[in-house]
Amino acid sequence: MPEERRMEILSVLEALEDLIDSGVSVPFTGKCVVNRDEILDIIQDIRLKLPDDLKQAQWIKEERERILAEAQQEADNIVKNAEGTIAAMVDEHEISRRAYEQADAIIFNAKKNAREIRLGTREYADDVLNKVEEILEDTLEVIKSNRDELK
């Protein structure tokens, strides 16, 4: 969640706290009377701000899938080019032997690079999704805490 968005949500939650703090206390009950419409407006504002975070999480997931698809395509192209290089070489004994050795090395390196790209991409996407999950959990905890205070 961008810092600006997080600050907006925190600001709205502070407004909710202020509204509850300024409520009229009901003697001997530990409860207070607050303006229902104002509370509902603030909750609506929170709802309007949270979907952006959910959309961002969806975008991150789609971006991860796109990056993985690009990495796979790049790996496939590298392998295809390597196979094309093998097919194009002259089939004489020594030249062929060298060509096959080089082709195997190219294919091995291409597969290794593709695997590293996929792993790195997955780790990056997982890290980003973890961060978004942490932020959403923190926000949910604040909301639950505020709801508990309302009760």
Image (cartoon, rainbow, N blue to C red):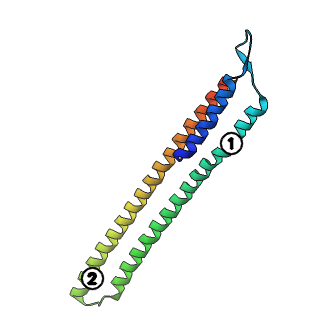
Residue at 34% x, 65% y: name it. Answer: 112
Decide which of tag 1 and tag 2 comes sooner along the chain: 1
Looking at the image, residue 149 sits to the left or right of residue 131; the answer is: right
Looking at the image, residue 119 sits to the left or right of residue 97; the answer is: right
Q: Is residue 68 above or below residue 40?
A: below
Residue at 33% x, 83% y: name it. Answer: 86
| Callout 2: SS | helix
Whether residues under marks 1 and 2 lie with C-beta atoms below 8 angstroms apart, the answer is no
Looking at the image, residue 142 sits to the left or right of residue 74; the answer is: right
Query: Which dot, 1 or 2, sits closer to the camera?
Result: 1
Residue type at mark 2 is Ala
Residue type at mark 1 is Arg
Q: Which mark is residue 39?
A: none
Spot occupied by residue 94 in the image (x, y as percentages of width and height):
21, 86
Q: Is residue 26 above or below residue 98?
A: above
Give the number of callouts. 2
Question: Dividing the image into 4 quarters, which one contains the C terminus?
Answer: top right
Q: Is residue 36 above or below residue 25?
A: below
Residue at 65% x, 48% y: name it. Answer: 51
Residue nearest the viewer, comparing 126 with 81: 126
Q: Is residue 69 above or below residue 104?
A: above
| Callout 1: SS | helix
Residue nearest the viewer, comparing 22 with 69: 22
Q: Which mark is residue 47?
A: 1
Q: Which mark is residue 99?
A: 2
**Residue count near mark 1 (Cα–Cα under 10 Å), binned few <14, some 14–19, many ≥20:** few
- Name the quadrant containing residue 11: top right
Spot occupied by residue 22 in the image (x, y as percentages of width and height):
69, 23
CA separation in Å, label 1 and label 2: 63 Å
Looking at the image, residue 29 sits to the left or right of residue 123; the answer is: right
Spot occupied by residue 38 in the image (x, y as percentages of width and height):
75, 33
